[in-house]
Amino acid sequence: AAAGSPAPLVSDEPRLDLVVFTVIVDDLVFPDGTTSMGVLGGGGPQTAFGFRTHFGNFSVGIAAGVGPDFPEQCADWLDTNGVDTEGLALVLDADTTESEESTSTEKEKGGVALVLDTDKQEKEKKGVSWEGGGASASSFRRRGETLDDDDSKRYLPTPRAWQITEHDGARTQVWRTRPSPGLYAMLRPPFSTLPAKYKNAKAFHVGVHPERPDLDLLLALRNSRGGEILISVEPFTSALNPVSNELLTQLCSVCDVFSPNELEAVSLVGSGNPVELCERLAAFGAKIVCLRRGELGAVVLDTRISPNETWSVPAYLRDSETSDVTGCGNAFCGAFLASLLHGEGVAAAACWGSAAASVMAENAGVPTVPAGDAQTRNEVQKRCEALLVKTKRIK
């Protein structure tokens, strides 16, 4: 491993097939003004749903910080969908710690790993400047113990946000939870806080801000188990400012699958047709580029084989049944990864992704019928097969 990186983890501990990150409780606002409150979201659950729709019946765990107020119905949804929740942790609010604790960089207390903020300047930053940089801000404690009222106040609340969708499909997220270093640490917990079976996972899917990707986390994941893993990276927003070639190379090179939507790709490498966008991102080191295009489907480039292959996959459209497009990209990425782990090629994987995304779109929030239910899996497989016959190799 590179200097300063963790030693490769090789263990006889059980291995999850996939670990996903981030839980946010969404309060949805639709174009007609109607709302749906307290919906499980954040990218991690939707990715897990897509992953679990594959008939491979793969295992998935979710790593995220949640508060003592984490809604019971959200925990029930994760359990019903077969998502391992050992990676959910309570996160100590740095503002409530005693002065002697706040000067510690790392300590063990009652089996709880503490990773506390010692950078006062970091605390003074505002809003999104913490994206990808708040991992040192909080202490993590495994859930499961009953907390009294006083103890509960020592922990940050579950991340919560408005998700406002416009008529053209554009979506705006507005935080309801107070922004802080701890909040952003909750979205992508440090590698050191993950349970052993999470560190040993076969694959990881991470959502990142392209201007501030959490490279420390990504590099730690890359070095786990000697690098014998699959890493998928999905930008969760477009870059508003230019991203340097050096940073984009680091981001694309650390992952196996890079999956932006078309607007996000343009923000990184400039305007172009879908094939050009994929090729430019591959030039920065991405092995597989999966360009998600909404109702236009997806274009996927595989550079692992020679000659390289580029495929165009349509979307599965049933407009009359579209309810909410929030999380469709995440579901796509989850099903795409499951197909790759099953040994299928990128064309079939993209068909699985489109099929899972179409099921997500027909629900307001995460689907109520579990991903592992035979009804769901049969429907996703049927849609995947319908898309596969329409899939074309374009280069």
Image: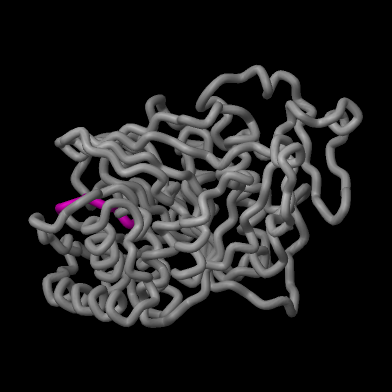
Query: Going by the picture, which residue comes out furthest to the front?
Result: 149
Decide whether residue 321 is among the magenta residues. no
Question: Which quadrant of the rendered structure holds the N terminus?
Answer: bottom right
Q: Position of residue 84 (x, y in %)?
A: 57, 67
Q: Is residue 261 above or below residue 344?
A: above
The residue shown at (15%, 69%) is 392
* Number of marks: 0
- In the picture, measured across the screen, residue 216 lies left or right of residue 131, that is right
The residue shown at (22%, 65%) is 311
The residue shown at (59%, 38%) is 157
Decide whether residue 295 is among the magenta residues. yes
Q: Nearer the viewer, residue 161 or 205?
A: 161
The residue shown at (45%, 57%) is 45
Q: Nearer the viewer, residue 172 or 92?
A: 92
Q: Position of residue 8 (x, y in %)?
A: 73, 64
Q: Position of residue 147 (x, y in %)?
A: 73, 48
Q: Nearer the viewer, residue 196 or 112?
A: 112
Q: Which of the 4 image quarters holds residue 198?
A: bottom right
Q: Is residue 351 above or below residue 155?
A: below
- In the picture, measured across the screen, residue 229 lies left or right of residue 364, that is right
User: Which of the colour schemes (rainbow, by chain, secondary structure, one colour) is used?
Assistant: one colour
Q: Which residues are magenta?
A: 290-296
